[in-house]
Image: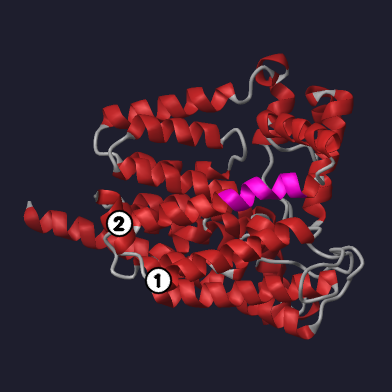
Amino acid sequence: MTGHRWYSTVPVWFWSVVALGAGLRLYLVFFSQGTYDVGFWQLHAMRVNEMGLLAYYHSSQNANHPPFILEFASYLLRFAEWTGIPFRILLRAPIATLDGASAFLLLKLLKVHPWRFALTAAFWINPLAIILSAYQGNTDSTVAFVLLLVAWLLSRRQPAAAAIAMGIGFWIKLPAIVALPAFLVYLRHWRQRTLFLFLTAVIGAVGYLPALFQDPAIVATNVFGYHGRMLQTQAGVPAWGPRALFFSVIASPEKWPEQLHAPVLFFLQHDWQIGLLLAIAVIALRWPRRSALGLCATVAMAYTALCGVTDYWAFQYFAWSLPFWFFLRPWFFIPATIMVSAYIYSLYWKLCGNPWLLGTWDFAGNLFWPPIVVLFRDLAVVFFFLAALAFVIASVRYSLLRVRSNRQTT
């Protein structure tokens, strides 16, 4: 009866949206070629099969993924060769499927929200979510799934299961670690926090064996030491971040006053560390947030603070937190969806040569981008930079009000 009552509350239009989002993802998985990431993953798989995992780590700094997922890709390539199914399909189909699981978890976490179906539908047919999960050809969307699963399990008071999910997530990609402090402060007791942290570390470490025992230095350097890369064309057109903000929106480099050169260069050299510190500060300042909705909003703010001020973690990395945008207010998730989707879709249209994303993605061959693409990029960059600052300021204000309230009660 419970299942019947749940299905009876789903609006008819919602199933149409589900079918539309699924159809678009299937279309991209089966008919599009994807970005350079597809080729990079196929190269990873080939090299692991030919050289072995540790030798491949030593041969290339681009081998920056955890051991488990690289080994998995190598077996996926063997399966592709055996069955004749293109590797690009086998690589992206599981990621697109996990995006569906993320939508389901989003709906479960929003169960008390009056607009839960509309918000879930907004994520599921979000062009950015569709492109990053079914077209891009990378594993970034799995981060969001893992984080949603952990948040849902914690909301059901299952910290051990949540820790296991978090640890397994580290086998695929590490950026979920940014949200780890938020999960720790969400738990009420130190015993729960210790258990969660211990299980996460143990389960996570299992996915790095035996490579971590055989050569810990190379694993630490290639995997744990990786902090993203700034993406720009060979003509110097930045894909995202402060360089676009400073040198495209504000002024070209030669017009900056000389006394600002040193601080601007310092910021650009260290913006990923600054973004990480801001993300951690947001989490710390918003403690305590005891509701699942508050926890998910904190996660969204933390990743926005990270991606909003750095050149290094952006572009497809919005997939890490995209479902969590819908736990924030409409002033954020509506313009964020419109601006970033417009930027990514218009850019990929240009790089593929057609609006259906069926051509060959050619980033290297497009040194300069059309003005409309640059405009969309600049609007998105400015919005996320300002949103990051707004979330930090709001978190400081929340913390000060909490301190004042505690003083008044004592």
User: Which residue matches tag 1?
Assistant: 12
Three-letter code, disc 2? Trp
View extreme (left): residue = 410
Residue 311 shows in the view: no
User: Which residue is drawn at the image coordinates 29% and 39% (left, top)?
Assistant: 187
Predominant SS along the magenta part: helix
User: From what the image shows, is residue 34 above or below residue 59?
Assistant: below
- Helix, strand or loop at mark 2: helix
User: From what the image shows, is residue 176 above or below residue 126?
Assistant: above
User: Which residue is drawn at the image coordinates 73% and 44% (left, top)?
Assistant: 90
User: Which residue matches tag 2?
Assistant: 6
Dividing the picture into quarters, in which one does residue 189 lie?
top left
- Helix, strand or loop at mark 1: helix
Q: CA distance from mark 2 to mark 1?
A: 13 Å
Give the residues in magenta: 89-97
User: From what the image shows, is residue 60 above or below residue 249?
Assistant: above
Q: Is residue 95 magenta?
A: yes
Decide: few, some or many residues near mark 2? Use Cα within 10 Å; few <14, some 14-19, many ≥20. Answer: few
Residue 296 shows in the view: yes
View extreme (bottom): residue = 371
The x and y percentages for residue 206 are: 57, 22
